[in-house]
Image: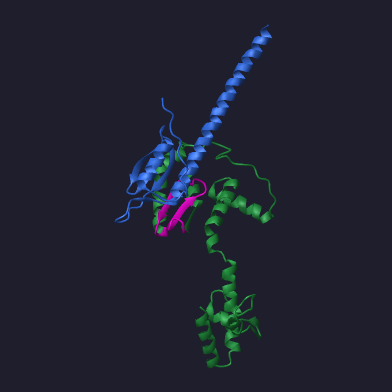
Amino acid sequence: MKWKSIVKTAVCSWSDEDECFVVKSSLFPRIIGTDESARGAWTMFRSMLDDAFDDIGQDRVAGYKKGRPARGGVNVHLQCRAETRDALAGLAAEFEVSQGDVLDFLMHFYENCKQYMPTEEAEYKLLSQVAVPYPGMPQERAAAPQPVESTFGIGYPAAAVACPSVAEPHASQSFALDCPNEAEKEKIKKSNKTRT
Amino acid sequence: MAKKRKPQKPNKLSGMDEHDFLGLLKEMGFKSNQTRKNEYQIRTESGELVGSFGVYHQKGTKSFVKPCYVKELWKAYEEIQEEGTAEEEKGEAGEIQDVEEIQEKGGDKK
Protein backbone atom coordinates (compact mmCIF):
# COMPACT_ATOMS: atom_id res chain seq x y z
CA MET A 1 0.00 0.00 0.00
CA LYS A 2 1.45 3.34 -1.05
CA TRP A 3 1.20 6.59 0.89
CA LYS A 4 0.17 8.44 -2.28
CA SER A 5 -2.58 5.90 -3.04
CA ILE A 6 -4.06 6.22 0.45
CA VAL A 7 -4.10 10.03 0.25
CA LYS A 8 -5.58 10.02 -3.27
CA THR A 9 -8.42 7.71 -2.26
CA ALA A 10 -9.26 9.75 0.85
CA VAL A 11 -12.55 11.65 0.90
CA CYS A 12 -13.54 14.50 3.20
CA SER A 13 -17.21 14.95 4.04
CA TRP A 14 -19.42 16.35 6.78
CA SER A 15 -20.86 13.72 9.11
CA ASP A 16 -24.11 14.55 10.89
CA GLU A 17 -23.59 11.66 13.28
CA ASP A 18 -20.10 12.74 14.29
CA GLU A 19 -20.92 16.46 14.04
CA CYS A 20 -17.60 17.16 12.34
CA PHE A 21 -15.75 16.73 9.06
CA VAL A 22 -14.43 13.21 8.55
CA VAL A 23 -11.52 12.28 6.26
CA LYS A 24 -11.21 8.59 5.47
CA SER A 25 -9.56 6.54 2.72
CA SER A 26 -11.29 3.48 1.28
CA LEU A 27 -7.86 1.87 0.97
CA PHE A 28 -7.07 2.09 4.68
CA PRO A 29 -10.18 3.14 6.62
CA ARG A 30 -8.64 2.60 10.05
CA ILE A 31 -7.10 6.06 10.01
CA ILE A 32 -9.70 8.79 10.31
CA GLY A 33 -9.13 12.51 10.51
CA THR A 34 -11.85 14.48 12.28
CA ASP A 35 -12.29 18.16 13.00
CA GLU A 36 -14.84 20.98 12.98
CA SER A 37 -13.13 22.31 9.83
CA ALA A 38 -12.34 20.38 6.65
CA ARG A 39 -8.77 21.70 6.73
CA GLY A 40 -8.33 20.50 10.31
CA ALA A 41 -9.66 17.04 9.42
CA TRP A 42 -7.22 16.77 6.52
CA THR A 43 -4.33 17.92 8.73
CA MET A 44 -5.18 15.32 11.36
CA PHE A 45 -5.53 12.59 8.72
CA ARG A 46 -2.15 13.44 7.18
CA SER A 47 -0.31 13.55 10.52
CA MET A 48 -1.86 10.23 11.64
CA LEU A 49 -0.98 8.63 8.31
CA ASP A 50 2.61 9.87 8.56
CA ASP A 51 2.90 8.35 12.04
CA ALA A 52 1.42 5.02 10.96
CA PHE A 53 2.95 4.69 7.52
CA ASP A 54 6.07 2.76 8.55
CA ASP A 55 3.82 -0.05 9.77
CA ILE A 56 1.49 0.13 6.75
CA GLY A 57 4.39 0.14 4.26
CA GLN A 58 5.95 -2.89 5.91
CA ASP A 59 2.63 -4.76 6.30
CA ARG A 60 2.74 -4.74 10.08
CA VAL A 61 -1.00 -4.18 10.22
CA ALA A 62 -3.24 -6.52 12.19
CA GLY A 63 -5.83 -8.28 10.03
CA TYR A 64 -4.22 -7.27 6.71
CA LYS A 65 -2.49 -9.88 4.57
CA LYS A 66 0.40 -9.14 2.26
CA GLY A 67 -0.29 -9.61 -1.44
CA ARG A 68 -3.54 -10.59 -3.15
CA PRO A 69 -6.36 -11.19 -2.41
CA ALA A 70 -6.19 -8.50 0.25
CA ARG A 71 -8.84 -7.69 2.86
CA GLY A 72 -11.13 -10.59 1.98
CA GLY A 73 -11.78 -9.33 -1.55
CA VAL A 74 -14.41 -11.08 -3.67
CA ASN A 75 -14.57 -11.64 -7.42
CA VAL A 76 -17.05 -9.58 -9.42
CA HIS A 77 -17.83 -10.06 -13.10
CA LEU A 78 -19.83 -7.25 -14.61
CA GLN A 79 -20.59 -5.53 -17.87
CA CYS A 80 -20.34 -1.78 -18.22
CA ARG A 81 -19.80 0.82 -20.94
CA ALA A 82 -16.46 0.74 -22.72
CA GLU A 83 -15.72 4.32 -21.57
CA THR A 84 -16.33 3.30 -17.95
CA ARG A 85 -13.92 0.40 -18.29
CA ASP A 86 -11.27 2.72 -19.74
CA ALA A 87 -11.91 5.30 -17.02
CA LEU A 88 -11.54 2.61 -14.33
CA ALA A 89 -8.22 1.54 -15.82
CA GLY A 90 -7.14 5.20 -16.00
CA LEU A 91 -8.02 5.86 -12.37
CA ALA A 92 -6.31 2.65 -11.28
CA ALA A 93 -3.12 3.80 -13.04
CA GLU A 94 -3.41 7.30 -11.55
CA PHE A 95 -4.00 6.10 -7.99
CA GLU A 96 -1.57 3.17 -8.40
CA VAL A 97 -4.13 0.71 -7.08
CA SER A 98 -6.14 -2.18 -8.55
CA GLN A 99 -9.41 -1.64 -10.42
CA GLY A 100 -11.21 -3.28 -7.49
CA ASP A 101 -9.74 -0.63 -5.19
CA VAL A 102 -11.03 2.04 -7.62
CA LEU A 103 -14.54 0.55 -7.34
CA ASP A 104 -14.24 0.59 -3.54
CA PHE A 105 -13.15 4.23 -3.75
CA LEU A 106 -16.05 5.18 -6.05
CA MET A 107 -18.58 3.61 -3.67
CA HIS A 108 -16.89 5.35 -0.73
CA PHE A 109 -17.03 8.64 -2.66
CA TYR A 110 -20.71 8.15 -3.51
CA GLU A 111 -21.63 7.26 0.06
CA ASN A 112 -19.97 10.41 1.34
CA CYS A 113 -21.14 12.79 -1.35
CA LYS A 114 -24.72 11.68 -1.93
CA GLN A 115 -25.87 14.14 0.72
CA TYR A 116 -24.95 16.90 -1.77
CA MET A 117 -26.84 15.34 -4.68
CA PRO A 118 -30.27 16.65 -5.69
CA THR A 119 -33.13 14.95 -3.93
CA GLU A 120 -36.73 14.87 -5.03
CA GLU A 121 -37.49 17.60 -2.51
CA ALA A 122 -34.70 19.84 -3.84
CA GLU A 123 -35.90 19.30 -7.39
CA TYR A 124 -39.45 20.28 -6.42
CA LYS A 125 -38.08 23.42 -4.80
CA LEU A 126 -36.26 24.31 -8.00
CA LEU A 127 -39.38 23.63 -10.04
CA SER A 128 -41.39 25.92 -7.80
CA GLN A 129 -38.85 28.67 -8.45
CA VAL A 130 -39.41 28.44 -12.18
CA ALA A 131 -43.15 28.05 -11.58
CA VAL A 132 -43.69 24.79 -13.43
CA PRO A 133 -46.70 23.20 -11.72
CA TYR A 134 -46.11 19.86 -9.99
CA PRO A 135 -48.55 17.56 -8.17
CA GLY A 136 -49.58 19.11 -4.87
CA MET A 137 -48.08 22.52 -5.67
CA PRO A 138 -49.73 25.29 -3.62
CA GLN A 139 -52.14 27.47 -5.56
CA GLU A 140 -50.19 30.73 -5.05
CA ARG A 141 -47.03 29.15 -6.39
CA ALA A 142 -48.81 27.76 -9.43
CA ALA A 143 -49.93 31.31 -10.18
CA ALA A 144 -46.34 32.59 -10.25
CA PRO A 145 -44.78 33.70 -13.59
CA GLN A 146 -44.99 30.97 -16.21
CA PRO A 147 -42.30 30.12 -18.77
CA VAL A 148 -42.43 32.52 -21.67
CA GLU A 149 -41.57 32.07 -25.31
CA SER A 150 -38.84 34.23 -26.75
CA THR A 151 -36.69 34.25 -29.83
CA PHE A 152 -34.31 31.99 -27.85
CA GLY A 153 -37.01 29.39 -27.20
CA ILE A 154 -38.80 28.88 -23.89
CA GLY A 155 -37.26 30.90 -21.07
CA TYR A 156 -37.95 31.08 -17.37
CA PRO A 157 -37.78 34.73 -16.34
CA ALA A 158 -38.20 33.95 -12.65
CA ALA A 159 -35.35 31.45 -12.66
CA ALA A 160 -32.91 34.01 -13.99
CA VAL A 161 -33.56 36.18 -10.95
CA ALA A 162 -33.96 33.47 -8.33
CA CYS A 163 -31.00 31.26 -9.10
CA PRO A 164 -28.78 32.54 -11.90
CA SER A 165 -26.36 29.66 -11.40
CA VAL A 166 -28.88 27.04 -12.42
CA ALA A 167 -30.69 29.09 -15.06
CA GLU A 168 -29.94 28.27 -18.64
CA PRO A 169 -27.64 30.77 -20.36
CA HIS A 170 -30.43 32.13 -22.50
CA ALA A 171 -32.79 32.60 -19.55
CA SER A 172 -31.33 35.93 -18.47
CA GLN A 173 -31.48 37.15 -22.06
CA SER A 174 -35.09 36.09 -22.38
CA PHE A 175 -35.72 37.90 -19.10
CA ALA A 176 -34.41 41.11 -20.66
CA LEU A 177 -36.36 40.56 -23.85
CA ASP A 178 -39.61 39.42 -22.29
CA CYS A 179 -40.04 41.92 -19.50
CA PRO A 180 -41.71 44.89 -21.07
CA ASN A 181 -41.13 47.33 -18.23
CA GLU A 182 -39.34 47.89 -14.92
CA ALA A 183 -42.54 47.48 -12.90
CA GLU A 184 -42.99 43.95 -14.21
CA LYS A 185 -39.36 43.17 -13.38
CA GLU A 186 -39.80 44.41 -9.80
CA LYS A 187 -42.94 42.32 -9.43
CA ILE A 188 -41.06 39.15 -10.40
CA LYS A 189 -38.17 39.97 -8.08
CA LYS A 190 -40.58 40.51 -5.20
CA SER A 191 -42.41 37.25 -5.81
CA ASN A 192 -39.06 35.42 -5.91
CA LYS A 193 -37.98 36.99 -2.64
CA THR A 194 -41.11 35.79 -0.89
CA ARG A 195 -40.62 32.28 -2.25
CA THR A 196 -36.96 32.05 -1.21
CA MET B 1 -5.46 -19.55 33.33
CA ALA B 2 -8.76 -17.69 33.44
CA LYS B 3 -10.40 -17.27 30.04
CA LYS B 4 -10.40 -13.70 28.71
CA ARG B 5 -13.81 -12.01 28.64
CA LYS B 6 -15.13 -11.43 25.11
CA PRO B 7 -15.91 -7.73 24.53
CA GLN B 8 -19.53 -6.78 24.07
CA LYS B 9 -20.40 -4.93 20.86
CA PRO B 10 -21.22 -1.35 21.90
CA ASN B 11 -24.99 -0.91 21.70
CA LYS B 12 -25.33 1.86 19.16
CA LEU B 13 -21.70 2.13 18.14
CA SER B 14 -22.07 5.74 19.08
CA GLY B 15 -19.38 8.00 20.44
CA MET B 16 -18.12 7.32 23.94
CA ASP B 17 -15.98 9.02 26.51
CA GLU B 18 -12.26 8.35 26.56
CA HIS B 19 -12.43 6.17 29.69
CA ASP B 20 -15.04 3.80 28.18
CA PHE B 21 -13.18 3.70 24.88
CA LEU B 22 -9.91 2.73 26.56
CA GLY B 23 -11.84 0.07 28.52
CA LEU B 24 -13.20 -1.36 25.26
CA LEU B 25 -9.69 -1.40 23.79
CA LYS B 26 -8.44 -3.37 26.78
CA GLU B 27 -11.24 -5.92 26.44
CA MET B 28 -10.37 -6.34 22.77
CA GLY B 29 -6.75 -7.01 23.70
CA PHE B 30 -5.44 -3.81 22.15
CA LYS B 31 -3.24 -1.12 23.65
CA SER B 32 -2.96 2.54 22.77
CA ASN B 33 -0.09 5.00 22.76
CA GLN B 34 -0.30 8.75 22.33
CA THR B 35 1.50 10.00 19.22
CA ARG B 36 0.51 13.69 19.30
CA LYS B 37 -1.79 15.93 21.26
CA ASN B 38 -5.29 14.37 20.92
CA GLU B 39 -3.99 11.59 18.63
CA TYR B 40 -3.51 7.95 19.59
CA GLN B 41 -2.32 4.78 17.85
CA ILE B 42 -3.94 1.43 18.60
CA ARG B 43 -1.82 -1.72 18.47
CA THR B 44 -2.29 -5.38 19.24
CA GLU B 45 -0.38 -6.96 22.11
CA SER B 46 2.14 -8.30 19.58
CA GLY B 47 2.76 -4.72 18.39
CA GLU B 48 0.90 -4.80 15.06
CA LEU B 49 -0.88 -1.60 14.05
CA VAL B 50 -4.69 -1.60 14.27
CA GLY B 51 -5.48 2.04 13.53
CA SER B 52 -5.34 5.63 14.74
CA PHE B 53 -7.93 7.72 16.52
CA GLY B 54 -8.44 11.21 17.87
CA VAL B 55 -9.88 12.44 21.16
CA TYR B 56 -11.82 15.65 21.73
CA HIS B 57 -11.29 17.74 24.82
CA GLN B 58 -14.15 20.13 25.34
CA LYS B 59 -14.23 22.60 28.21
CA GLY B 60 -16.23 21.31 31.17
CA THR B 61 -16.94 17.91 29.58
CA LYS B 62 -15.20 14.54 29.48
CA SER B 63 -12.82 13.75 26.62
CA PHE B 64 -14.90 12.33 23.82
CA VAL B 65 -14.26 9.79 21.04
CA LYS B 66 -16.31 10.21 17.84
CA PRO B 67 -18.71 7.46 16.68
CA CYS B 68 -16.76 6.89 13.45
CA TYR B 69 -13.72 5.67 15.45
CA VAL B 70 -15.81 3.29 17.54
CA LYS B 71 -17.41 1.82 14.40
CA GLU B 72 -14.09 1.41 12.62
CA LEU B 73 -12.46 -0.08 15.71
CA TRP B 74 -15.22 -2.69 16.00
CA LYS B 75 -14.87 -3.53 12.29
CA ALA B 76 -11.10 -3.91 12.73
CA TYR B 77 -11.65 -6.14 15.78
CA GLU B 78 -13.98 -8.41 13.78
CA GLU B 79 -11.53 -8.57 10.85
CA ILE B 80 -8.68 -9.55 13.17
CA GLN B 81 -10.85 -12.16 14.88
CA GLU B 82 -11.91 -13.61 11.49
CA GLU B 83 -8.32 -13.81 10.32
CA GLY B 84 -7.31 -15.52 13.55
CA THR B 85 -10.10 -18.09 13.19
CA ALA B 86 -9.23 -18.74 9.53
CA GLU B 87 -5.58 -19.30 10.42
CA GLU B 88 -6.51 -21.64 13.26
CA GLU B 89 -8.72 -23.70 10.91
CA LYS B 90 -5.94 -23.76 8.34
CA GLY B 91 -3.54 -24.97 11.00
CA GLU B 92 -5.89 -27.73 12.14
CA ALA B 93 -6.52 -28.83 8.54
CA GLY B 94 -2.75 -28.96 7.99
CA GLU B 95 -2.28 -31.14 11.08
CA ILE B 96 -4.99 -33.58 9.95
CA GLN B 97 -3.42 -33.72 6.48
CA ASP B 98 -0.02 -34.49 8.01
CA VAL B 99 -1.47 -37.36 10.02
CA GLU B 100 -3.21 -38.74 6.94
CA GLU B 101 0.02 -38.47 4.90
CA ILE B 102 1.97 -40.35 7.58
CA GLN B 103 -0.70 -43.05 7.74
CA GLU B 104 -0.70 -43.37 3.94
CA LYS B 105 3.11 -43.61 3.83
CA GLY B 106 2.98 -46.17 6.59
CA GLY B 107 0.39 -48.13 4.63
CA ASP B 108 2.56 -48.07 1.50
CA LYS B 109 5.52 -49.54 3.35
CA LYS B 110 3.44 -52.48 4.43
Residue closest to the eye, B55 or A23: B55
Q: Where residue A119 sits in the image (x, y, percent)?
A: 58, 66
Extreme-top residue of the structure: B110
Q: Is residue A109 above or below residue B106?
A: below
Quadrant (top left/top right/bottom left/bottom right) for the N terminus of chain B: top left
Residue at image coords 55%, 25%: B91
Q: Would you say A41 lies left or right of A71 here?
A: left
Identify the coloring: by chain
- Residue A168 in sight here: no
Location of residue A42 by image quarter = bottom left
- Residue B9 in sight here: yes
Residue at image coords 35%, 40%: B33
Q: Is residue B45 above or below residue A143?
A: above
Q: Would you say A193 lies left or right of B102 here?
A: left
Q: Is residue B27 above or below residue B88?
A: below
**What's drawn in magenta, residue-wise?**
A15-38
**Chain A: what color?**
green
Residue at image coords 29%, 56%: B60
Q: Where residue A31 sits in the image (x, y, percent)?
A: 44, 47
Residue at image coords 68%, 53%: A80
Q: Would you say B54 lies left or right of A114 here?
A: left
Q: Where residue A13 sits in the image (x, y, percent)?
A: 48, 58
Residue A30 among those drawn in magenta: yes
| Chain for colour blue | B
Q: Where residue A117 sits in the image (x, y, percent)?
A: 56, 64
Residue A31 among those drawn in magenta: yes
